Amino acid sequence: MSATTAPTSSAPAAETTGQEIHHDRNRWGQIRLYVGLAVIVVWGLAPAYWMVVTAFRDVGYTFDTSPWPTHVTLDNFRTAFDTSRGNHFGAALWHSIVIGIVTTAVAMLVGVFAAYAMSRLNFPGKFIILGVILGSSMFPGVALVTPLFQLFSNLGWLQGVNYQALIIPYISFALPLTIYTLTAFLAEMPWELEESARIDGCTPGQAFRKIMLPLAAPGLFTTAILVFIASWNEFLLASQFSTKYTQTVTVAIASFTGAQPHQEPYTAIMAAGTIVTVPLIIMVLVFQRWIVSGLTAGGVKG
């Protein structure tokens, strides 16, 4: 009589092997993700890092290839503000701040009411108007330089203190971004909030001011930052319409001159670029949570 042996089940072993393979795939997937993110971060921040390093480097070592700060000095920052060489960087900083603040304030004031109407009110042609607004943002700015130059020349806006020659075009370019971003944000906010406020006795204006605006703060904050940065970095129109009384930082940096004719003061240019750029980078990094939430979240779902 022969004995029969029951076959040993391999299911547990197979299950363990499958789990290990799945775990290895997840681990390698995470490694590839982090490596890709590291490459993107290095690629994006490497120029800014090199600018900062060169800004603190002695002018005699401008083309030093060391990735670390060597022969550190602050003379480049003093040179950037040295008006004896024809550089008006300090005044240009003030001009850019004034233009950026006014542009942002007006664009936000007009944009928030327009966005509220586009997102909360029903009227004929609403989507056509929104399409025209978006279409206007796709129009190349360089195509507007010549007609704007002719118009501003006829109005006498290309002489003396001519902030309006920059602020008005900047507002025109900022409004499509402002209206579209805030429209998408306000459209996601529940109607019940306004209705509850009106039931409690608020007028439409009070409901908008006391209920909608506070809840829309992330979107407003994000949009204001984007508008200000766009105004701060703009070069094309500023190079054509600004005068020495309204010259912005981008034009001032491009106009830097050295101690001798045709000399490019690279270290001073890098110092000026650091002053202009690094605060914006720090601001975006500090407020990135609010910026991301303003771009992705529509409001509080009730």
Image (spheres, grey):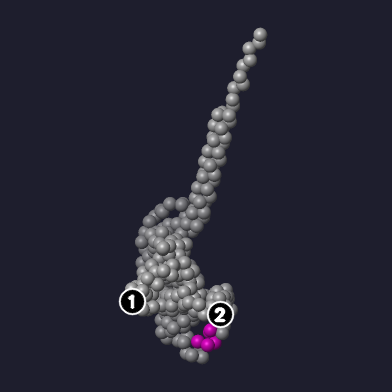
Tell us which disc is closer to us: 1 or 2: 1
Query: Where does the image place residue 67, in percent across and percent down from the top left?
Result: 46, 52
- Occupied quadrant, residue 274: bottom left
Identity, as a three-letter code, of the amino acid under mark 1: Gly
- Specify the principal SS of the magenta part: helix
- Location of mark 2 (residue): 125
The extreme top residue here reads 1
Q: Residue at x 53, y 42 (%)?
A: 26
- Occupied quadrant, residue 140: bottom right
In this rendering, the answer to whether 208 lies above or below 43 is below
Q: Residue at x 46, y 59 (%)?
A: 48
| SS at mark 1 in the image | loop
Judge by depth and name the residue closer to the eye, 224 or 12.
Answer: 12
Identity, as a three-letter code, of the amino acid under mark 2: Gly
Quadrant for the N terminus in the image: top right
Q: Does residue 151 belong to the magenta stretch? A: yes
Query: Where does the image place residue 241, in percent across and percent down from the top left?
Result: 49, 81
| SS at mark 2 in the image | loop
- Location of mark 1 (residue): 201
On the question of residue 203 being in view, the answer is yes
Quadrant for the C terminus in the image: bottom left
Classed neighbour count for the residue bearing mark 2: other residues with Cα under 10 Å, few (<14), some (14–19), many (≥20)? few
Query: Is 109 displayed left or right of 5 in the figure?
Result: left
Judge by depth and name the residue closer to the eye, 195 or 256.
Answer: 195
Q: Which residue is drawn at 42% across and 86% down?
A: 160
On the question of residue 79 being in view, the answer is no
Query: Where does the image place residue 127, in percent across and percent down from the top left?
Result: 55, 76
Q: Which residue is drawn at 51% across and 91% down?
A: 154
Span of residues in magenta: 148-152
